[in-house]
Amino acid sequence: MQLSLDDNFLKKSAAVAGVSLAVMLILLKFFAFLKTDSLAIFSSLADSVTDLFASMVSFVAVYFSTKPASKSHRYGYGKSEALSAFLQAVFVAASGIFVIIDGIKRIISPVAIEKTDIGIFIMLFSIFATLILVLFQTYVANKTNSLAIKADRAHYTVDFLTNSTVVVSLILVHFFGFVYFDVIAALFISAYLLYNAYDLAKEAVEQITDKELSPEIRQKIQDIVSHSEGIHGMHDLRTRSLGDIYCFELHLEIDGKISLLEAHKLSDAVEHKIIDAFPGSQVIIHQDPYGIHEDRLDHQLDGSCRL
C-alpha cells in the first residue's frame, strides 16, 4: 500500500511520542530505583532505556521510509524500518540478558527493598502513560502497517506488562516482605524481553530477505488473475514487502495470436485490479504466449524442469 501525507504524519507523530515517553519514564524510574533499590524497577528501567533506543531508531527509520523513491533507491526506503526493528531486537535481547545476570547475583546475595510506596506511585503513573501511547501506536500501526511503529509498540506493550508486574512485586514486598519476588519478577520480565526480541528479529529478517507474502495474499492475486478476461493462466508469481508497499511480479499467459497492444491492455486490466486490491503496490507483469513449454521459476522451485 502507498501511504498518504496524513499517514506519514501519523507515523512521525507516533515515533516522536515514543521518544518523549521513554525519556520521561527513564528519569522517573531512575529516581524510583535510587529510592527503593528494587531489581524489578531496575529491570523496568532497563526496558525503558531499550525503549528510548528503539524509539530513536524508529524515528530515524520512519524519516527515511517516508522519503520518496530516488535514482539511487528506485524501490524507495521502506526496508529501513525492517533494519531498525532488527537493531531494536538485538538491543532488547542484550538488556534482558543483563537483567538476568543481575537477578542471579541477587538470588545469591539478597538486597533489601526500601520506600516501596514511592516506587508503586511512579510505576502506576508509568502504566497509565504507557497505555495511552500503546493505544495511539496501535491505531497508527493498523492504519499504516509500519513495521517500525509495530516494533516500537511491541516494546511499550512489554513495558506496560513489566510495569504491572513491578507494581505487584512492590506490593508483595511492601506488605509481606517477600524480597525474592522482586527478583522473580525481574527474571520474568527479562525472559519476556528475550522472547519479544526473537519475535521482532524474525519479522525483520523475513522482510529484509524478501520472504514471500502470506498465502492469503498470494491466493488473492491468483483469484484476480483467474477471473480476468483474456487471461489463460499465470506462473512465476513472486511477492515481497518493501516496507509499507507490496511488490508483485508475475507472468501472464495470453493468446499468442493477438497483437502486442491487445496483450498490453489485458495486462493493464490485471495490474489495475491488483492495485485496487492492494493500494500503492508495485506490479511487474511479463506476458507469455499461452501454451509454450519452457523452464520456469515454478519448475525450478519444485525441482522439475519442463522444457
Image: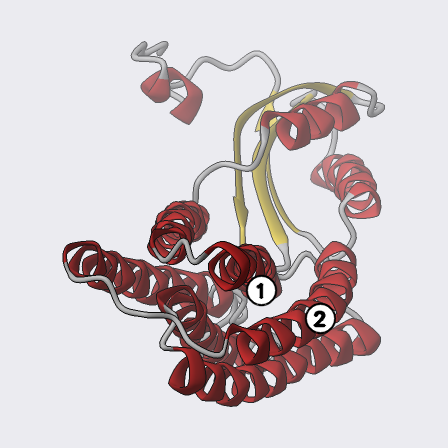
Residue 146 pos. (x, y %) = 63, 61
In the rendered structure, the answer to whether residue 149 lies left or right of residue 274 reads: left
Question: Residue tagged by mark 1?
Answer: 156
Element under disc 1: helix
Residue at x-position 47% and y-position 60%: 173
Quadrant of the snapshot with the C terminus:
top left
In the rendered structure, the answer to whether residue 82 lies left or right of residue 100 reads: right
| Nearest to the observer: residue 46 or residue 280 | 46
Q: Are marks 1 and 2 in contact (CB under 8 Å)?
A: yes
Q: CA distance from mark 1 to mark 2?
A: 8 Å
Compared to residue 186, the image places residue 219 above or below, namely above
Residue at x-position 40% and y-position 48%: 188
Residue 44 pos. (x, y %) = 45, 68
Question: Residue tagged by mark 2?
Answer: 133
Compared to residue 200, the image places residue 117 above or below, namely below
Residue at x-position 76% and y-position 41%: 274
Compared to residue 89, the image places residue 16 above or below, namely below
